[in-house]
Image: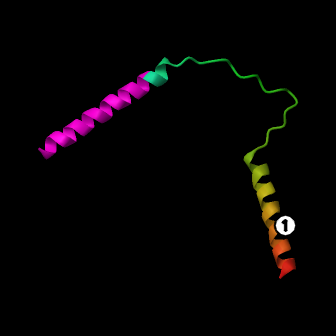
Amino acid sequence: MKITVVFRNIISLVVLNVVAVATVAAQSGGATPDPIPSNAVPIDGGVGFLVAAGVSYGAKKLYAKKR
């Protein structure tokens, strides 16, 4: 009896995956996004790290000043 329960669960998962893939594949592409303007400045990961470091440094200084 244990094997039939496992087999039924496997079949259910396979059917669910097939339905999910078919649903995703049937969706249309939709409208294309606007192109990036030529004057846009890319914010890279390095700038984000610098901003995070500045914020944490400022918070540390404020915390030290209050103590």
Residue 11's image quarter? top left
Residue drawn where x is 26% and y is 37% of the image: 10
How many numbered circles does the render carry?
1
Residue drawn where x is 59% and y is 18% of the image: 29
Looking at the rendered structure, the kind of residue marked 1 is: Gly
Q: Is residue 4 magenta?
A: yes
Name the colouring of the figure.
rainbow
Relative to 51, say whether 38 is above or below: above
Residue closest to the far left: 1
Relative to 25, say whether 56 is above or below: below
Residue that carries the numbered disc 1 in the rendered image? 58
Residue 3's image quarter? top left
Residue drawn where x is 62% and y is 18% of the image: 30
Other-residue count near label 1 (Cα within 10 Å), few / some / many at <14 / 14–19 / ≥20 = few
Secondary structure at numbered mark 1: helix
Residue 8's image quarter? top left
- Residue 35 lies left or right of residue 21; in this view the side is right
Query: Which secondary structure is most common in the magenta stretch?
Result: helix
The N terminus: image quadrant: top left
The C terminus: image quadrant: bottom right
Rendering coords of residue 33 (x, y %): 71, 22
Rendering coords of residue 43 (x, y %): 79, 42
Q: Is residue 59 magenta?
A: no
Range of residues picked out in magenta: 1-22
- Residue 64 lies left or right of residue 12; in this view the side is right
Relative to 47, say whether 34 is above or below: above
- Residue 17 lies left or right of residue 27; in this view the side is left
Rendering coords of residue 50 (x, y %): 80, 56
